[in-house]
């Protein structure tokens, strides 16, 4: 069935480097996407969102890119810090619910 | 941002007993609440969607008699795991939204059935 999934399950980066986390989705009708950060034992926290009528959105140190042609979503984190270590999920909003990708664990090395 | 409070954060119960988990929206009226289950190192799996005053809509494969969901008010939804068994041990997370916002998540509840 249709789903949202990630290319890489784990990502390890050096502190200060930029991180890129990728996500593929298959429902071309989805019009809203969200990135969440989940620290161990906690609920997901909203990071940034993007609507399908946009291809880029920037926040503080984070940028989300949306490529509707290939149904690909990415989260870029600039100057990655140890506090960024967490699992990152992309989510696809379908009507009244959200479907999550598998998640990528980001580890930041000091 | 909006605050969603989930309680308890951790619970241990004996096999065969029932456990209730509460999800409250503290500063907005949650017209819709969602319940998710998360297995270790896995993504969130949507269990059910509930609208205030209506019966919950369960995802395929989720037993409605096992996981009772009540959304009696615009600020409170409860998930009751009935006759819990060790395989029900998991991390349960709720989220809530109103008609204007994206969903905000609770802190999650770690259920351990012994």
Image (cartoon, grey):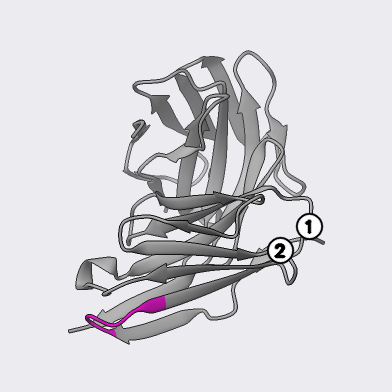
Depth order, front residue of B91/B29: B29
Tell me the magenta residue range: A14-19
The quarter holding residue A96 reads top right
Q: CA distance from mark 1 to mark 2?
A: 8 Å
Chain letter of the residue carrying label 2: A
| Image position, residue B78 (x, y; %) | 50, 27
Tell me, yes or no, whether the highlighted magenta stretch contains residue A18.
yes
Residue A56, placed above or below residue A105? above
Residue A43 visible somewhere in the drawing:
yes
Q: Is residue A98 above or below residue B66?
A: below
The residue located at (62%, 46%) in the rendering is A98
- Residue A28: image tag: 1
Q: Position of residue A64 (x, y in %)?
A: 49, 62
Q: Residues within 10 Å of mark 1 (few under 14, many from 20)?
A: few
Relative image position of residue A49 (x, y in whole percent): 50, 50
A69 left or right of B36? right
Q: Chain of mark 1?
A: A
Residue B11: percent from left, percent from top: 35, 43
Which mark is drawn over residue A68? 2
Q: Quick check: is A66 in the magenta stretch?
A: no
Q: Are marks 1 and 2 on the same chain?
A: yes
Q: Are marks 1 and 2 in contact (CB under 8 Å)?
A: yes
Predominant secondary structure, magenta span = loop
Q: Secondary structure at mark 2?
A: loop
Quadrant (top left, top right, bottom left, bottom right) of the C terminus of chain A = bottom left
């Amino acid at each position: 069935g249709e789903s949202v999934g990630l290319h890489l399950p784990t990502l390890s980066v050096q502190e200060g480097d930029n991180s890129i986390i990728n996500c593929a989705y298959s429902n071309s009708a989805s019009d809203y996407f969200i990135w969440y950060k989940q620290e161990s034992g906690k609920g997901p926290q909203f990071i940034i969102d993007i609507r399908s009528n946009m291809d880029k959105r920037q926040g503080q140190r984070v940028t989300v890119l949306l490529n509707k042609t290939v149904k690909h979503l990415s989260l870029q984190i600039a100057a990655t810090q140890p506090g960024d270590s967490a699992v990152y999920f992309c989510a696809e909003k379908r009507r009244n619910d959200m479907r999550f990708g598998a998640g990528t664990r980001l580890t930041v090395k000091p | 941002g909006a605050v969603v409070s989930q309680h308890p954060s951790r619970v241990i119960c004996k096999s065969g007993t029932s456990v209730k988990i509460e999800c409250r929206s503290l500063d907005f009226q949650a017209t819709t609440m969602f319940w998710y289950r998360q297995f270790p190192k896995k993504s969130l799996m949507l269990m059910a969607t509930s609208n205030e005053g209506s019966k919950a809509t369960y995802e395929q494969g989720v037993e409605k008699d096992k996981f009772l969901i009540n959304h009696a008010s615009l600020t409170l939804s409860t998930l009751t795991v009935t006759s819990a068994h060790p395989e029900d041990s998991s991390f349960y997370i709720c989220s809530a939204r109103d008609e204007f916002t994206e969903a905000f998540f609770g802190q999650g509840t770690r259920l351990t059935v012994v």
